[in-house]
Image (tube, rainbow, N blue to C red):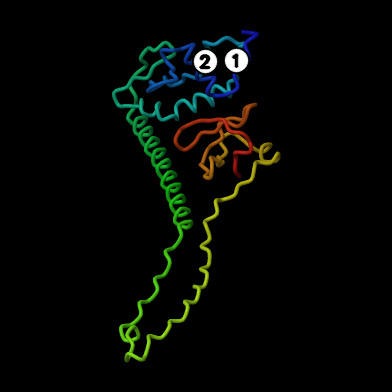
Amino acid sequence: MENQPKLNSSKEVIAYLAEKFPLCFTTEGEARPLKIGIFQDVVARLPEETLFSKTQLRTALRLYTSSWRYLHGIKADAQRVDLDGADCGALEEQHVEHARKQLEEAKARVQAQRAAQRRESGEATQNRRPRPAAKKPAPSATAAQPTSRNQSQPKSKPAQPAAPRAAVPVKEVEKSRPASAADMAALKTGQNVRVRAGKSAMDATVLEIAKDGVRVQLASGLAMIVRAEHLQF
């Protein structure tokens, strides 16, 4: 234990808990509802030379219980479990309803973000598409025929070149700036930020500030570590 490095991210803490208490925590599939007060049980069962702090444990449990797979497991017929997988009573109706609303809101946010991205992509494509050239008017029947054999059809004047059309401005992608040192120094857990992904940005919440970057949770429930230059303020 002394030679084992400390855990830096919530993902590593959850993986460690799943290894220590496999009947309670899981890293794959639908998660089982946890016993109320599981935080105190974990602190009591793990040795003092633990690989993570209590703050890290709270953050990891908050991430675990807000994930989509955990919310899917909050059902009316489900039982809460302790660290050994033993049943600790049925879920209360208000807890089931709260989890259902959280899941619906998270899915709605993801659908709204995807729809906005599709609209932005469609507008940019439409603005880049060239407009069809205007058709020349057909000559009238009277002007096309000569009045007599000795009169020839008047020569048509060369067509004047069409005036160039004003270029349609393409919608500029919102520019972002990398986070400054002052931004990173003031960054706090729970703060709302935007994460740059390609040409779009997504809403996210700061879960923790780790050595290898900032761990955030997207509106979809997905947690990831991003570098400072991928954050927007």
Percent across and percent down for residue 46 are 54, 11
Q: CA distance from mark 1 to mark 2?
A: 9 Å
- Secondary-structure class at tag 2: helix
Circle 2 residue: 16
* Residue drawn at (39%, 27%) of the image: 69
Q: Foreground residue, 69 or 101?
A: 69
Say if 198 sits above or below 58 in the image.
below
* Residue drawn at (57%, 24%) of the image: 9
Task: Quadrant for residue 133, please give it.
Answer: bottom left
Percent across and percent down for residue 101 are 37, 37
* Residue drawn at (44%, 48%) of the image: 116
Q: Foreground residue, 88 or 169?
A: 169
Please, which residue is most extreme toward the right here?
A: 181
The image quadrant where one finds the N terminus is top right
Q: Are marks 1 and 2 in contact (CB under 8 Å)?
A: yes
Say if 231 sits above or below 20 in the image.
below
Q: Crowdedness of circle 2 by 10 Å Cα count: few (<14), some, many (20+)? A: some
Percent across and percent down for residue 70 are 40, 26
- Secondary-structure class at tag 1: loop
Task: Quadrant for residue 56, please give it.
Answer: top right
* Residue drawn at (41%, 86%) of the image: 154
Task: Quadrant for residue 210, please give it.
Answer: top right
Say if 45 sits above or below 169 in the image.
above
In the image, which disc is placed on residue 176? none
* Amino acid residing under circle 1: Leu
Of the image marks 1 and 2, the number of the one nearer the N terminus: 2
Q: Foreground residue, 168 or 60?
A: 168
* Amino acid residing under circle 2: Tyr
Percent across and percent down for residue 225 are 57, 30
In the image, which disc is placed on residue 51? 1
